[in-house]
Amino acid sequence: MIRDRDTRAGRKIRVLVVDDSALVRQVLTEVLETDPSLSVMATATDPYVAVKYIQKEVPDVIVLDVEMPRMDGLTFLEKIMSQHPIPVVICSTLSEEGSDVALTALEKGAVEIITKPRLGAKEFLEESRLSICDAVKSASQARMPRSGGRGRPAAPMAVTPKLTADAVVPKPSPRVRFQTTDQVVVVGASTGGTEALRELLSGLPPNAPGVVVVQHMPERFTRQFASRLDGLCRISVKEAEDGDPVARGQALIAPGNRHLLLRRSGMRYLVQTKEGPLVCRHRPSVDVLFRSAARCAGSNAIGVLLTGIGDDGARGMVELKESGAFNLAQDEASCVVFGMPAEAIRLGGVDRVIPLKQVAQELVRLAG
């Protein structure tokens, strides 16, 4: 019999790692246990072994490979979600095929993606360690299908300096005014954002204002993600490239591992992709996009902040509002994790809080 998860506040987040590679299991265990709020309760070579552990004690989060013998990760994920939903983080390879399978897993209920450690690489860069640990902590707070609430409060983060958008773009002057009437929509999302963006963008008409999106996602996954959305939406969707114009009927998705900024060229808006440090522990960062929009679009911008853990985008949304932009936030009931919108609301950067299903319609109304 499966025992329910213990949700006592203050204890460590228990993680089950499922991967057929002994080296990957070892490296992930070492990386996860550098964070004082995480504990690897067990590792399993395949889903059959994982089930035996789950029958004894249900983990808070499962880190799951998608390509394994005996039972693949997608089949196991479907069984988990249909029988006893548990937050799942997909551990995938940096390949086109791996990206496609990982995105399918998100559609089937997984909440985060991390990239699989390269074989033989025992030492991780600090950024990689942070992204893996943060993804697992984000997943632990996700609202699962049969969950009665949001889950417990966030576990303490490892003590690491957290840079602001100052590290990439200077702070804008308040209340910037421009002569153009072109509007631009800037959107930020994290945990649960892939499905939220699908619903938002698929609801926009072909003549919708240009949309620029930051979704926290590893590199090489964003191109496949944009391609999937392009096939589902009436607007076109593509992974942003440096210098792309922002045009009506198109959404540009920030490429993984690069910041995305809005720029102005005469009467047009362009995007710039940029290297730089992690901002709010992320690259791309929503704060960076929002600040750049505040600088060059001001009251011509509409800001949207969707589901996600942490506070990335909250300060940038305040700057957008100060520059004259109108801002929307996804409401708690429709969020997988009500972290980023909640922080933006707390700071006073949000003009209207609405359910996800109403965001597309509201954007069309605001754009006139």
Image (tube, rainbow, N blue to C red):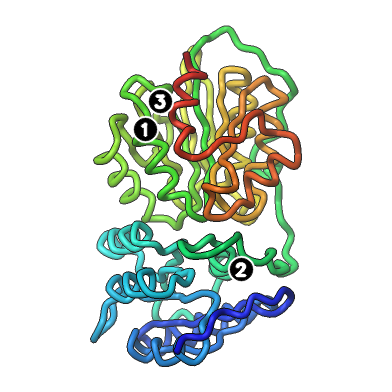
First along the sequence among labels 3 and 2 = 2
Asked whether the viewer can see residue 250, the reply is yes
What residue is shown with label 3?
245
**What's the amino acid at mark 3?**
Pro
The picture quadrant where one finds residue 331 is top right
**What's the amino acid at mark 1?**
Gly
Q: Is residue 191 above or below residue 334?
A: below
Q: Position of residue 255 (x, y in %)?
A: 43, 46
Between marks 1 and 3, how big is the CA–CA gap?
22 Å
Residue at 36% across / 32% down in the picture? 203
The reply to whether dot 1 and dot 3 touch (C-beta < 8 Å) is: no
Q: Quadrant of the N terminus?
A: bottom left
Q: Nearer the viewer, mark 1 or mark 2?
A: 1
Between marks 1 and 2, how big is the CA–CA gap?
39 Å
Q: Nearer the viewer, residue 346 or 294?
A: 346
Q: Is residue 81 above or below residue 196?
A: below
Callout 3: SS: loop
Disc 2 residue crowd, few under 14, some 14–19, many 20+, Cα 10 Å: few
Q: Is residue 146 above or below residue 280?
A: below
Residue at 64% across / 79% down in the picture? 34
What residue is shown with label 2?
126
Asked whether the viewer can see residue 275, the reply is no
Callout 2: SS: helix
Q: Is residue 237 above or below residue 64?
A: above
What residue is shown with label 1?
203
First along the sequence among labels 1 and 3 = 1
Q: Nearer the viewer, residue 327 or 2?
A: 2
